Image (cartoon, rainbow, N blue to C red):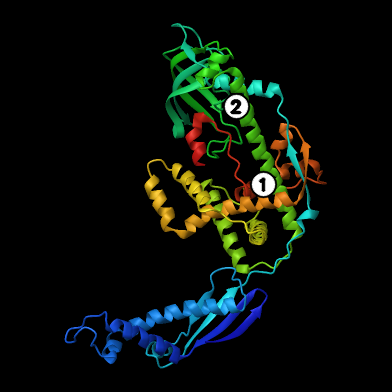
Amino acid sequence: MEVTETLSEGLKREFKVVIPATDLESRLMARLVELKDQVRINGFRPGKVPLDHLRKTYGRSVMAEIVQQVVSETSQTALTEREIRPAFQPDISFAESEQELEEVMQGKSDLTYTVALEVMPDIELADLSKIKLTREVTEIPDEDVVEAVKRLAEQNRSYTSRKEGDKAQEGDRVTIDYDGSVDGTPFEGGKDENVYLVLGSNQFIPGFEEQLKGAKARSDQTVNVTFPDDYPAEALAGKKAEFKVTVHDVAEPAEGELDDAFAQTLGLESLDSLKDAVRAQIENEHASLSRRKIKRILLDELDKQHELELPPTLIEQEFDSIWSQLTNDMESSEKSFEDEGTSEDEARAEYRTIAERRVRLGLVLAEFGEKSEVQVSEEEVTRALQEQVRQFPGQEQQIYEYYKENPQAIASLRAPIFEEKVVDHILEQVDVTEKVVSREELLLDPEDEKTAKEKPAKKTTKKAAPKKTAEKKTPAKKKPAAKKTADKS
């Protein structure tokens, strides 16, 4: 094998590899000798088929297998000997001339092919001991636990139908059918039956619940409301709507006591046990919020501390993924870049920056993980697969088989586990100081905190909607009166 480097430009490399025809010929003859005792050809006894006849019959197909095997072996050997780490699967190309390829297949010519690839950049990892981070934590007052228990009691409150002719009051639960229309035309998601609605819960769009106060069981009502200007379904935003409502039942809430008996209805021994469980749940929520925030801050710091040349193809692949998601989301919501106060060129530049950040951090975290020998166990992947399968009730077997038959799908489960383990490892190495904050501060996104502290000299055009699509998805506030429409928008 002869390997010649033909290109070394930045992270791009290209090699010309030549495999002598004599090497291919020796492999071919060895394989034909093996076949001699395996094949059955009319007119010849087993094991007595002449090699020339075998070559004439099977030579081309056997040579094709040999060429494929040789290319796989020699290309990998060429990279290993030069300690080259490809950023992605190398691109292998052969001579375009059919005559040249035919001569190779006949064993008359050397095999020549080209390997083109981009290599992983050299990464000088930051000194983690010099990184200082602040982890926000919050204390849980007893009154917060009590309030959470009260909300739990309200959610599990029982209701008793009022007497015939009694009017619905604030806090009552009405059972209704509704059928909405805009300018006399029904709209998707504007109809439902046997819906529970607690008056005063603000579950439906503004004005809807107020107009049902005073309604009686087995009565028909007409509710006129206006959808908010910022309603998630743009086709309904700011529109006046009429709902034909049938009230089937009006029920008043039962007086519930926060005592051991209530806790036992939830499967716990006592009210104290319930409070302990609620406190533990709140602590887990706070810990998750705290972890998410410090991870974001850590990634920002790692991004600032690592300057490296990025493989162009990886950037393009990441950008294409982001851009495809963005344009699909905008198409489904019937939005344009102009609606978001930007242009396609500006958006492309913004998302290319995001793609570069993701690639840079991916390479840095991978390098930290490799240096620290972070591993993802098969047990961890299996748990992740089981969680994924549970999200598709009734299709468990199909989903399970899909992942088992697709290595890339399994890799998509392994990658986030690896990232979280690397982040945990890094957080153990950096200097972390805890800071007690309020729950409201803990809930703030780092970007929101930064924006709140800054005082821009002039008002700028907001471009938040496209950016949120790529970096984080913020669900719209649910409005069950047209819930199905909002869910699909």
Labels 2 and 1: the sequence-earlier one? 2
In this rendered view, identify the residue nearer to me: 440 or 234: 440
Q: Element under label 2?
A: helix
Q: Which mark is residue 148?
A: none
- Between residues 319 and 413, which one lies in front from this camera angle? 413
The location of residue 478, given as percent across then percent down, is: 55, 33
Residue 349 x, y percent position in the rendering: 67, 59
Residue at 48% in and 25% down? 243
Quadrant of residue 177 within the rendered picture? top left
Query: Marks 2/1: CA distance?
Result: 38 Å
Q: Is residue 116 above or below residue 52?
A: above
Residue drawn at x 49%, y 41% as measured from the top left: 488
Q: Please say whether residue 215 is visible from this viewpoint.
A: no
Q: Which residue is mark 2?
A: 277
| Residue indicated by mark 1 | 464
- Closer to viewer: mark 2 or mark 1: 2
Of the residues shown, which amino acid type is indicated by label 2? Answer: Ala
Neighbour tally class for label 2: few under 14, some 14-19, many 20 plus, Cα within 10 Å: some
